[in-house]
Image (cartoon, rainbow, N blue to C red):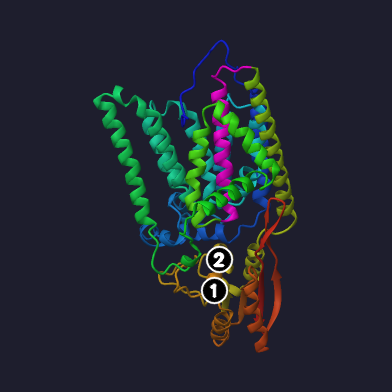
């Protein structure tokens, strides 16, 4: 089976690309931007968003590349983008504006895809990951969609636009480790496509491809050097390098099916029909290679936040298949198969759209994180000028609202305010695998011995109760304010991000 192959044009018998009236495209784009404005206004950034912003704001580029990214496990592109508004002193809300602008570029590129059915171009922008989870919730993954759309634009002409293709792969690799895996998969696919033609290459063509491959390999080596895991990485115990075929496949199915409609009958039927259609459109190998490239990194560490990478990869192949359909001859059976595939994809997008509506309703009605309310209270009562302590690393979600370090007991070597993922962090941190609650209580007693005036405590994890128990046991502290918050995931609350503020009464 071919991994991918150029389409066979049959101009007189191929499907005429679906036309979208310019007014419809403008209406979709305006509606999308309007939705994002509503989301940005309502959304309270959470810890992960705060962490990226603080790194971009506090770290020099030298330290970013040589010290801190090793602890984050993320390539530098997103931090370099955020460094522009962060280092210029723009408001913290700029992180959401930047994310929305990038997402809007991706939607604009989608609307230009004439070979993609109009219904998909209208619905896809409003799905869960593109309209909310990778846009309003600002993460580096927002960069994936526009880059994948740019790759789609030149996919059938990669040899002609080789250096543009290489640039896009480098950018893709700098989004996240998942992007790095996808960039490697795209490279493998291209080699398979051009390998049969190698005997026709002239000297210049060989040199061009050799240099392009060298650039990609250098990109991998430099990124690996930047992200080499440090010996004192606190979450090292959470990383699982014990690969088995059963675990890798189980992780892949769980991640892919959950990113679609859940590990049930609909996802199985969707993938079955789509894989047959992918095979007919000569993109099944593309699908298997791209999804397969995500499995190793997902087997080492996977979180629900990574589901969207699988969804966007799946949709890239769907869009590529429609682009192939526009230049392929189709019989009656092929046409019925394509209609079935289109119907299932539209049902999937409607399901995702329902998740978008639920997410927006939740974010409009309730706080996604208690961090903004806590920051407003602290500023209003000028607590930043007092001896304010913190407990639980999520309290640093409050820090971006202040220009200087907020917590008197969080003093880092280098003076930065973002969370230190090393084992020598000033705050207590242990991964769940080695969590000892008596250690948490001992750390808290050490803090209380310093008699802080105020204590802001994270209430994200059940173990955070130990901090509160020690506070109340002294009899010296009273709860004066609670700042509730919770992350909404698709159709339900995923996890809490609340905070409680205690004051010393005597």
Q: Which residues are magenta?
A: 303-331
Determine whether 475 is above or below 156 in the image.
Answer: below
Question: Which residue is pictured at 56% across the width and 10% down the height?
Answer: 12
Residue 501 in the image: x percent, y percent?
Answer: 66, 75
User: Residue 148: x, y in percent?
Assistant: 51, 37
Question: Is tag 2's residue or tag 1's residue first in the polypeptide sequence?
Answer: 2
Q: Nearer the viewer, residue 289 or 1?
A: 1
Magenta segment: does it hold 329? yes
Packing grade of label 1 (10 A; few <14, some 14-19, many >=20) is: many
In the image, is residue 21 above or below residue 353?
above
Which residue lies under the disc numbered 1? 407
The answer to whether 117 appears left or right of 446 in the picture is: right
Snapshot quadrant of residue 28: top right
Point 45% across, 67% down: residue: 416
Residue lying furthest left in this view? Answer: 203
| Camera sees residue 113 | no
Q: Number of callouts in the render?
A: 2
Q: Is residue 330 magenta?
A: yes
Residue 274 at x, y percent in the picture = 61, 33
Q: Which mark is residue 399?
A: 2
Image coordinates of residue 34 in percent, x first then y, are 67, 41
Tags 2 and 1 in contact by the CB under 8 Å rule?
A: yes
Q: Nearer the viewer, residue 334 or 431?
A: 334
* Residue drawn at (46%, 50%) of the image: 177
Is residue 475 at least partly visible in the picture? yes
Secondary structure category for the residue under label 2: helix
Q: Main secondary structure of the magenta part?
A: helix
Q: Is residue 403 left or right of residue 162?
A: right
What residue lies at 37% left-to-right and 53% top-to-bottom?
Answer: 224
User: Callout 1: helix, strand or loop?
Assistant: loop
Determine whether 95 is above or below 342 in the image.
below
Residue 9 or residue 78, whichever sits in front? 9
């Amino acid at each position: 089976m071919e991994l991918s192959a150029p389409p066979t044009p049959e101009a007189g018998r191929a499907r005429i690309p679906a036309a979208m009236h310019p007014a419809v495209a403008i209406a979709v784009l305006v509606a999308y931007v309007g939705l994002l404005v509503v989301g940005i206004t309502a959304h309270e950034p959470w810890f992960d968003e705060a962490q990226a912003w603080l790194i971009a704001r506090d770290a020099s580029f030298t330290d970013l590349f040589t010290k801190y990214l090793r602890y984050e496990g993320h390539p530098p592109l997103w931090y370099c983008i955020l460094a522009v508004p962060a280092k210029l002193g723009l408001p913290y809300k700029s992180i959401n504006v930047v994310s929305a602008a990038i997402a809007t570029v991706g939607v604009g590129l989608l609307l230009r895809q004439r070979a993609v059915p109009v219904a998909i171009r209208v619905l896809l922008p409003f799905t869960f990951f593109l309209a909310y989870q990778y846009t309003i919730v600002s993460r580096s993954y927002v960069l994936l969609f526009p880059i994948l759309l740019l790759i789609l634009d030149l996919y059938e002409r990669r040899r002609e636009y080789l250096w543009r293709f290489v640039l896009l792969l480098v950018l893709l690799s700098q989004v996240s480790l998942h992007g790095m895996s996808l960039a490697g998969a795209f490279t493998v696919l291209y080699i398979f496509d051009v390998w049969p033609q190698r005997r026709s290459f002239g000297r210049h063509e060989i040199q061009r491809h050799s240099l392009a491959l060298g650039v990609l390999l250098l990109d991998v080596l430099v990124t690996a050097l930047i992200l080499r895991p440090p010996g004192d990485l606190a979450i090292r115990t959470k990383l699982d390098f014990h690969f088995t075929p059963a675990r890798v496949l189980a992780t892949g199915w769980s991640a892919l099916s959950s990113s679609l409609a859940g590990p049930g009958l609909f996802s199985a039927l969707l993938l079955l029909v789509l894989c047959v259609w992918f095979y007919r459109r000569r993109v099944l190998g593309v699908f298997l290679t791209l999804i397969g490239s995500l499995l190793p990194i997902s087997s080492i560490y996977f979180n629900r936040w990574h589901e969207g990478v699988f969804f966007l990869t799946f949709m890239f192949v769907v869009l590529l298949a429609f682009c192939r359909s526009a230049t392929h001859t189709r019989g009656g059976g092929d046409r019925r198969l394509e209609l079935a595939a289109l119907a299932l994809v539209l049902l999937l997008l409607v399901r995702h759209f329902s998740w978008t509506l639920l997410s927006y309703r939740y974010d409009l009605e309730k706080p996604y994180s208690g961090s903004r309310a806590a920051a407003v209270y602290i500023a209003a009562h000028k607590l930043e000028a007092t001896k304010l302590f913190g407990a639980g690393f999520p309290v640093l979600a409050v820090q971006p609202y202040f220009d200087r370090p907020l917590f008197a007991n969080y003093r880092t070597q280098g003076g930065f305010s973002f969370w230190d993922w090393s084992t020598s962090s000033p705050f207590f941190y242990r991964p769940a695998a080695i969590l000892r609650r008596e250690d948490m209580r001992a750390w808290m007693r050490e803090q209380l011995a310093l008699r802080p005036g105020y204590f802001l405590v994270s209430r994200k994890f059940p173990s955070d109760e130990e901090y509160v128990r020690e506070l109340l046991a002294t009899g010296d502290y009273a709860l004066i304010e609670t700042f509730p918050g919770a992350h909404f995931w698709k159709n339900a609350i995923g996890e809490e991000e609340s905070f409680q503020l205690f004051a010393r009464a005597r």
